[in-house]
Image (cartoon, rainbow, N blue to C red):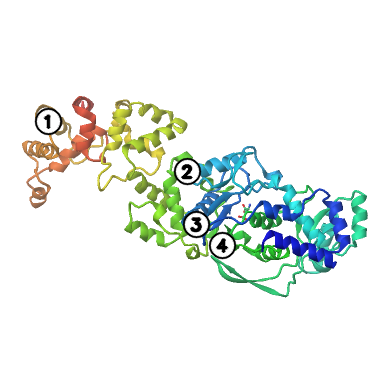
C-alpha cells in the first residue's frame, strides 16, 4: 500500500470515529512531540531494486568481541544480497545500553571489513553512517519508534502499563502457584483495561510506566508459518502483552525489529534460530502495524561438543567463538569464510573439489538448502582449509601476511623477515607450481616452518642433528666432505644435482638406486635416499623438509658449505 493511501485510511477511520478520540488524547499526552507515521512512510520509500533483489541485514549489539556467528550471518546475508542484486546493511541494536562497550560499533564494522564483509549501508563508525534509510543505530531512532507506538496507542492497540517490579513479581508467584503460564497476558494483564481517564490521571501524577502491546492473540489458536530454512512450523498465537517501549523511552527488540525492518524494507530476516519462537509475536506486530511482513529464515547456530552433548559455541566459554581468535593465531580470513560456507551449504564441498581455483563468489548459496540443525564447530577442518588456501597464495602474499601478523604478535619472526628478498625466496620454495606445498595453516606456524632457513635461528639449534640410517661419524663426515669437494655444482639443474648425489652414494659403496637396494638388501648398507637424508639433516637439522634442491638454491653455496662444515665440526 502506498504511504498516501495508508494515511488516507487512517484519516478516514478517524473521521468515521473508528479511532477513539480518547485514545488520541492519551497518545498525545504520552508522546506529545511524536510525528505522524506518514512522515516516516514518505521519508523511507520503497527501494528501487530489480525483481527478486534481497534486502538483508545483520543487527548486532555492540557488546564487544565479535562472535564468529555474527561473521557467519553477515557473510550469508551479504552473499545473498550480492547474488540477487540487493542490499546488505548493518543496523546496530543498542537499545540495551547496559551491555554496551566503548567503541563496540567500530569494532564490529572493522571486523566486518577485515573479512571483506563491508555493508552497502549502515554504520561506518560509532556515529557516522551511509545510506538513505538511517539512522542505522537504534538508540538514534527513538523518535521513530515513539511515532509508531503513538500510532498504536491512538488505535487502542497499545496501552501504558504502570505495574511495578513488585507487582510483576507477585503476579509471577501467583501464576507459578496456580501452575499456569507466566507472563503478562489475558486476565493477568492488570493495566490492559484501565480506562483512558485513569491512565491519564496516573501519568499526570508522574507515575512511572511503560508501553505494552494490547495483544489480540489467543493461545488456543494456531498460526502457520513457513520459514525459509526450517520449513513449515505451527505455533500458538501470541497472547502476551509484551513491552514495546521501555521506561527509558527506547523500544524492545521486538518492536524495533518490526519498525526498522519495515522502514528499511528488509525482504528477508535471516537471523539466529533463538528467535524462531518469537515469530508469532513478530507476525502479530507486523499485522497490528499494518506492515507487510518480511520472509524469515532462521539459521541454526554453530555448535560445540561438550561432555558428550552439544551446545552453542559460546563467547564466554570457547576462545574460538571470538573472531579475534583467528586473527591472533593467524588463520587467513579466506579460510574462515570458506569454512563457514562449508557449514552453510553441504554442496559447497563438492563444488570446491570440482572448482579448486574458483572464487567463492561463483558458488551460488541457497538459503533453502541450509541445514536445519547446527553444525559442529571443527577447528581441524578450518586449519585444513587454511592449508589449502595458503598454499595458493603467492610468496609475496605469504610474506606480507606473515609480516603483518608478526609485527603484532611475534617480534622474533618480524626480525627474521627483515630481509625481504631472501624471505621471498624462502616462501617461494615449492610454491606457484601445480601442486604447491601445503605446510602452513596459520601465520603463527610460519616461524617454526621456516626458521632453519635463517642462519641465526639455525645456529641456535646446532646440537640437534637427527641422522637416520647413516649415523656413524665417519660416514657422515665423508659424505659431507665429498659433497663439498667434488659433487656440489652451483649451476647444476635438478637432474644434474640428483645424479651427483647418486654418484656420491656409489662412491661410498651405497646403492645408487632405491630399487637396486631393495633387490639386494644384503649387498648394501644404505642407498641414495639415505645419503640425501644425511645432506638434508646437516643442511637443515630436519629429516622432513620441502624439496632439498630448491632449499640449496635459496641457501646458496656459501651457506651450504658453512652448514656442512659446522655439521662436521659437530661430529667431533
Ligand atoms: N540483535 C539481535 C541479535 O543479535 C538481532 C536479531 C535479528 O537479526 O533480528 O540476536
* Dot 3 or dot 1, earlier in sequence: 3
Of badges 4 and 1, nearer the viewer stands: 4
Crowding around mark 3 (Cα neighbors within 10 Å: few <14, some 14 to 19, many 20+) is many
Q: Nearer the viewer, mark 2 or mark 4?
A: 4
Q: Which mark is residue 80?
A: 3
- For the residues marked 4 and 1, what is the alpha-carbon distance in whole angstroms? 66 Å
Where does label 1 land, which residue? 489
- Mark 2 → mark 1, Cα distance in angstroms: 44 Å
> Which quadrant of the frame does ligand 1 lie within?
bottom right
Q: CA distance from mark 3 to mark 2?
A: 24 Å
**Callout count:** 4
Asked if the residues shown at circle 2 and circle 4 are in contact, with their CB atoms under 8 angstroms apart, the answer is no
- Residue beneath disc 2: 326
Depicted 235 relative to depicted 568: above or below:
below
Judged from the image, the secondary structure of the residue bearing numbered disc 3 is helix
Can you give x and y, in whole percent of width and height, for residue 209 in the image?
84, 53
Q: Quadrant of the N terminus?
A: bottom right
Amino acid at each position: 500500500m502506498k504511504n498516501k493511501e495508508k494515511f488516507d485510511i487512517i484519516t478516514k477511520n478517524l473521521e468515521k470515529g473508528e479511532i477513539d478520540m480518547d485514545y488520541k488524547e492519551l497518545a498525545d499526552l504520552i508522546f506529545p512531540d511524536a510525528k505522524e507515521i506518514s512522515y516516516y512512510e514518505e521519508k523511507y520509500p520503497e527501494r528501487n531494486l530489480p525483481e527478486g533483489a534481497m534486502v538483508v541485514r545483520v543487527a548486532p549489539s555492540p557488546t564487544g568481541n565479535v562472535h564468529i556467528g555474527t561473521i557467519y550471518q553477515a557473510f550469508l546475508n551479504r552473499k545473498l544480497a550480492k547474488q540477487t542484486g540487493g542490499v546488505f546493511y548493518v543496523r546496530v541494536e543498542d537499545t540495551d545500553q547496559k551491555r554496551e562497550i566503548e567503541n563496540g560499533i567500530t569494532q564490529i564494522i572493522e571486523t566486518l571489513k577485515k573479512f571483506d564483509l563491508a555493508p552497502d549501508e549502515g554504520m561506518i563508525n560509532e556515529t557516522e553512517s551511509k545510506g538513505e534509510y538511517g539512522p542505522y543505530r537504534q538508540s538514534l531512532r527513538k523518535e521513530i519508534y515513539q511515532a509508531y507506538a503513538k500510532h498504536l496507542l491512538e488505535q487502542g492497540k497499545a496501552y501504558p502499563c504502570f505495574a511495578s517490579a513488585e507487582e510483576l513479581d507477585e503476579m509471577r508467584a501467583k501464576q507459578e502457584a496456580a501452575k499456569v503460564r507466566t507472563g503478562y497476558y489475558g486476565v493477568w494483564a492488570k493495566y490492559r483495561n484501565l480506562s483512558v481517564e485513569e491512565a491519564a490521571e496516573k501519568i499526570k501524577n508522574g507515575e512511572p510506566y511503560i508501553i505494552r502491546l494490547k495483544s489480540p492473540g489467543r493461545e488456543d489458536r494456531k498460526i502457520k508459518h513457513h520459514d525459509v530454512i526450517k520449513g513449515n512450523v505451527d505455533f500458538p498465537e501470541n497472547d502476551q502483552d509484551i513491552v514495546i517501549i521501555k521506561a527509558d523511552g527506547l523500544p524492545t527488540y521486538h518492536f524495533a525489529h518490526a519498525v526498522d525492518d519495515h522502514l528499511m524494507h528488509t525482504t528477508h530476516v535471516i537471523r539466529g534460530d533463538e528467535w524462531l519462537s518469537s515469530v508469532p509475536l513478530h507476525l502479530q506486530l507486523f499485522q497490528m502495524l499494518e506492515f507487510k511482513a518480511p520472509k524469515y529464515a532462521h539459521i541454526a547456530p554453530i555448535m560445540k561438543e561438550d561432555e558428550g552433548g552439544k551446545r552453542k559455541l559460546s563467547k564466554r566459554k570457547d576462545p574460538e567463538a571470538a573472531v579475534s581468535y583467528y586473527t591472533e593465531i593467524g588463520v587467513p580470513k579466506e579460510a574462515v569464510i570458506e569454512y563457514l560456507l562449508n557449514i552453510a551449504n553441504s554442496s559447497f564441498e563438492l563444488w570446491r573439489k570440482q572448482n579448486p581455483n574458483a572464487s567463492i563468489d561463483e558458488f551460488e548459496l541457497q538459503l533453502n538448502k541450509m541445514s536445519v540443525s547446527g553444525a559442529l564447530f571443527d577447528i581441524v577442518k578450518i586449519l585444513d582449509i587454511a592449508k589449502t588456501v595458503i598454499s595458493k597464495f603467492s610468496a609475496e602474499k605469504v610474506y606480507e601476511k606473515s609480516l603483518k601478523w608478526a609485527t603484532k604478535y611475534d617480534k622474533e619472526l618480524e626480525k627474521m623477515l627483515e630481509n625481504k628478498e631472501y624471505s621471498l625466496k624462502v616462501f617461494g620454495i615449492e610454491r606457484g607450481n601445480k601442486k604447491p606445498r601445503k605446510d602452513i595453516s596459520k601465520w603463527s606456524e610460519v616461524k617454526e616452518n621456516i626458521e632453519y632457513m635463517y642462519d641465526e635461528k639455525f645456529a641456535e639449534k646446532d646440537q640437534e642433528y637427527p641422522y637416520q640410517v647413516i649415523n656413524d661419524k665417519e660416514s657422515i663426515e665423508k659424505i659431507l666432505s665429498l659433497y663439498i669437494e667434488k659433487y656440489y655444482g652451483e649451476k647444476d639443474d635438478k637432474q644434474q644435482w640428483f645424479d651427483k648425489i647418486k654418484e656420491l652414494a656409489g662412491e661410498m659403496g651405497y646403492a645408487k638406486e632405491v630399487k637396486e637396494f631393495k633387490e639386494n638388501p644384503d649387498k648394501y648398507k644404505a642407498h641414495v635416499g639415505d645419503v640425501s637424508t644425511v645432506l638434508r639433516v646437516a643442511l637443515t637439522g630436519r629429516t622432513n623438509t620441502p624439496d632439498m634442491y630448491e632449499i640449496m638454491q635459496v641457501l646458496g653455496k656459501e651457506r651450504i658449505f658453512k652448514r656442512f662444515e659446522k655439521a662436521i665440526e659437530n661430529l667431533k
